[in-house]
């Protein structure tokens, strides 16, 4: 019975997929730096909150450019070269950031970390689409997100303890786990790009981006993802600062974020197995409601238990979106444009990593926490309406192509 259940969970997912899954887990187990970067800059480098948020925003700027660049290179060069470049250069940039003292060097290093850390994402997304049939993609992306959050559940707790000893250990550990993912790719993963996608080199950038004009669902969906990400980013930028204002330190913040990861670990797999039957955009609308309510609840929080409740609520929204959104993008993409589509969608998240810290830090410092959390609630409700508005045209798109 157990063996039969295991086979049903893994059906349609080939061995190469599981190597990518393993590398993702290892990499995220060492995801120490970004959740604690604001605290590091404000406490160790004594940078004001608004400037620290700007530094973190540079990570988002690097990520934004990386997603577009990585998506295009993924289609032109292949998945494997892009992944190797990301996993072998990012550790060097991470160590550089750990030793940086001057603000200009911190800024440049943070941008470089954002670029090389996220350069691989379109390649992994495209590789999963290459390897996994349509009917199994929701599970595949859901399981991969589960691996990300298993690591995310453990990493902040370890990072919180290491931060009390030395922040430099965060940068070294993060770099090592990224390098291990590179070794997994180098020794275990061959190129997955389909034969029919290997004649992209002759196409100009203008020709390829012109094709995006014929896909308004992708563009609007990615636009909404930008604002979804802006809300989500507050959990890693302004949330630790707000908790600190009530005397809650790195250990408590690490535990709060660990709740996010552990909850995802507990329920992501069963949700991934049933999400294929959900109406896609209605599910995204529900996720936006939970995201907005969760961060909006932050206006009432002033103790660790209340912050924990807030995290639980917005995590439910995150889980719903994580199982559905990547499958939407993968199924929309023609074979020759898988990398580009992944890059467009990923760039929206990368841009939110830039805008989210900058906007959230400014609002928190100049208008206060209540305005910030209330704004998150309002924006979440606007996103809900946006996803519901997209539902009907998206269903017509599905009926026309039978790809979603």
Image (cartoon, rainbow, N blue to C red):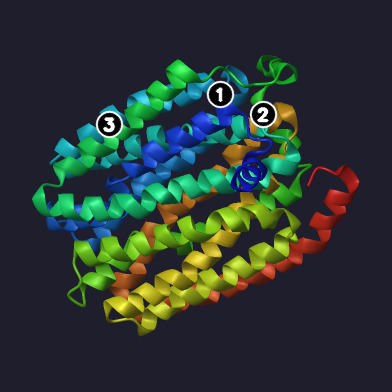
**x and y percentages locating residue 312 in the rendered image:** 44, 70
Q: In whole angstroms, how far apart are the C-alphas of marks 1 and 2?
A: 10 Å
Residue visible at 52% across and 69% down in the picture: 291
Are discs 1 and 2 less than 8 Å apart at CB? yes
**x and y percentages locating residue 263 in the rendered image:** 45, 62
The residue where tag 2 is placed is: 130
Position of residue 390 in the picture relative to residue 144 (left or right): right
Q: Earlier in the sequence, mark 2 or mark 3?
A: 2
Residue 225 can be seen in this image: no
Q: In whole angstroms, how far apart are the C-alphas of marks 2 and 3?
A: 28 Å
The residue where tag 1 is placed is: 79
**x and y percentages locating residue 325 in the rendered image:** 63, 52
Indicate whether 136 appears above or below 181: below
- Check residue 176 in the rendering and tell me which mark sits there, or answer none: 3
- Check residue 168 in the rendering and tell me which mark sits there, or answer none: none
Residue visible at 35% across and 46% down in the picture: 58
Are discs 2 and 3 less than 8 Å apart at CB? no
Task: Count up the numbered dots.
Answer: 3
* Disc 3 packing (10 Å; few <14; some 14–19; many ≥20): many
Element type at marker 2?
A: helix
């Amino acid at each position: 019975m157990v063996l039969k259940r295991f086979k049903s969970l893994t059906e349609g997912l080939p061995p190469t997929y599981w190597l990518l899954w393993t590398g993702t887990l290892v990499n995220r187990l060492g995801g120490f730096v970004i959740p604690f970067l604001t605290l590091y800059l404000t406490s160790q480098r004594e940078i004001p909150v608004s400037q620290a948020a700007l530094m973190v925003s540079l990570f988002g700027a690097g990520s934004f450019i990386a997603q577009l660049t990585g998506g295009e290179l993924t289609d032109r060069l292949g998945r494997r070269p892009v992944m190797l470049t990301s996993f072998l250069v990012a550790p060097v940039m991470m160590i550089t950031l750990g030793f940086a003292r001057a603000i200009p060097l911190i800024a440049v290093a943070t941008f470089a970390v954002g670029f090389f850390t996220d350069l691989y994402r379109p390649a992994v997304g495209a590789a999963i689409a290459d390897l996994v049939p349509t009917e199994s993609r929701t599970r595949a992306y859901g399981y991969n997100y589960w691996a990300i959050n298993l690591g995310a559940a453990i990493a902040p707790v370890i990072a919180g303890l290491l931060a009390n000893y030395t922040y430099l250990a965060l940068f070294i550990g993060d770099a090592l786990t990224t390098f291990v993912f590179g070794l997994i790719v180098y020794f275990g993963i061959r190129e997955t790009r389909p034969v029919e996608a290997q004649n992209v080199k002759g196409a100009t950038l203008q020709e390829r981006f012109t094709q995006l004009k014929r896909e308004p669902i992708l563009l609007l969906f990615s636009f909404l993802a930008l604002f979804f990400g802006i809300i989500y980013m507050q959990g890693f930028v302004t949330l630790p600062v707000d908790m600190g204002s009530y005397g809650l330190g790195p250990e408590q913040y690490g535990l709060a974020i660990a709740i996010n990861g552990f909850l995802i670990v507990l329920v992501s797999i069963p949700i991934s197995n049933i999400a294929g039957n959900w109406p896609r955009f209605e599910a995204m609308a529900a996720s936006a409601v939970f995201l907005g309510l969760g961060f909006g609840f932050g206006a009432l929080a002033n103790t660790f238990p209340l912050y924990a409740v807030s995290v639980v609520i917005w995590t439910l929204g995150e889980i719903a979106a994580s199982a559905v959104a990547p499958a939407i993008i993968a199924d929309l993409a023609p074979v020759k444009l898988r990398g580009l589509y992944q890059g467009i969608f990923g760039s929206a998240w990368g841009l939110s990593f830039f805008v989210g810290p900058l906007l959230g830090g400014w609002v928190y410092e100049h208008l206060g926490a209540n305005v910030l959390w209330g704004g998150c609630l309002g924006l979440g409700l606007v996103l809900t309406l946006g996803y519901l508005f997209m539902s009907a045209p998206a269903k017509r798109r599905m009926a026309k192509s039978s790809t979603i």
